[in-house]
Image: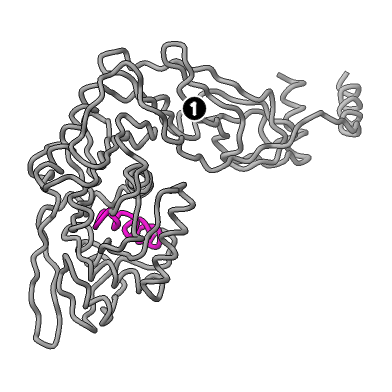
Amino acid sequence: MAFKKAIAFVMMLAITFSISAYAIEQPKEQQPPQPQQPVDGLPTLKVNAKAALLMEPVTGRILLEQNSHDRLPPASVTKVMTMLIIFESVEQGKIAWDDMVTTSEHAAGMGGSQVYLETMEQQTVRDLTKAIVISSGNDAAVAMSEFIAGSEDGFVTMMNSRAKELGMLDTNFVNACGLDDPNHLTSAYDISVMTRELITKHPKVFEFSTIWMDKIVHKTARGVEDFGLSNTNRLLKSYPAATGLKTGSTSAALYCISATAEKNGLQLNAVVLGAPDPTTRFGEAIKMMDYGFANYAMASGDAAGTVLGEVAVVKGNVEKVQVKVGSQVNALIPKGKSAELTKAIELSTSLPAPFPEGAKAGQAVYYYEGNEVGKCDLVTAAAVSRANLGDTMSRMLRKWFR
């Protein structure tokens, strides 16, 4: 009997078999959902400003908008794009927080809000970024633009290119800091788009934008001198949920803000352009965010990395592999209702080896009150290599003598 089993084992190894399989779809970078339209059935607000918009940045859901595509001067809210490029440059390894930046004569000569950098003065990227975010230093913004792109003009080209990539069709930048120019224009909608990109991709910005007071140290020919930084965003003191982000004002732009706040897991971004005075600017931003927090809540699907099943492996060194959630699905829902999402899981029947960890193996579709609110890839929790002779023999022996 043992001899017959041995013969059968050899014959099985000699058999060439083919199994129909399909190509593994490699996971694509998860793109954030595009901004959606306001929810019907809720009251709207009239904002005392030329333009305004309220967005929930995780889902991109627009909750309120008023003249949101009107092209207007943004003043120092321009620096949201400057900040975005700084954070992206650090993430990409082009610059580092401790790099020293030398102030040019051009940067030192910027008017408007400034931290009074002197020509040839050196500051770190970190301190110049603090000066931009906290005190809205035009000189700091231009110094960083020259450090990253070689010139402010080169940096402006980067700003406009990035705006185009983000779909900011109402925008044309002329400078890195927001000084008035008839061709330096954007919209409330576009500001919300670049704000969303900054705070969702680079939440480290909140480490800067939540600072109320700080300082930088001037080291010049006159000696060493502390310079105090005071945040231009009064919401940090008057609105407990405030997390940032950027104010701006000029004679042409009037009073502007891209304000961010978070409460009970819900983030909001309120953009106000062309308010008549600073009190109205902050008051209208608060009114919009109060509206959002009063009417909406966030419902979330399974966290990224949650294992939701397993898939058979064809010709692999293992027979099955676990699959996990690639990215969490979030849905904005009316406040006061159940925040529970239901889901349907769609898995491939099998995956042909080899494949890396993170190979797409299916998807999870999430529903709220029967309506689809989002979907995410289900991906393999481990890499699997192709089976070798030893793997095949071991597997067959386990089956025969089980």
Residue 165 vertical placement versus 229 (above, below): above
Magenta includes 77?
yes
Magenta includes 176?
no
Q: In which quarter of the image is residue 4?
A: top right
The span picked out in magenta is: 74-90
Q: In which quarter of the image is the N terminus?
A: top right
Q: Which of 86 and 355 is in front in this view?
A: 86
Q: Nearer the viewer, residue 115 or 344?
A: 115
Q: Can residue 200 be seen in this view?
A: no
Residue shown at the point (35%, 51%) measured from the top left? 186
Q: Name the residue under label 1.
A: 307
Q: In this view, does 49 lie to the left or right of 204?
A: left
Q: Nearer the viewer, residue 185 or 42?
A: 185
Give the class, few, some or many, for how many residues have Cα within 10 Å of label 1's Cα (few <14, many ≥20). Answer: some
Q: In which quarter of the image is residue 139?
A: bottom left
Magenta-drawn stretch, dominant element (helix, strand or loop)? helix
Q: Can residue 372 be seen in this view?
A: yes
Residue 206 vertical placement versus 138 (above, below): above
Q: Residue 166, percent across and down?
A: 45, 48
Residue shown at the point (30%, 54%) measured from the top left? 80
Helix, strand or loop at mark 1: strand
Residue type indicated by callout 1: Val
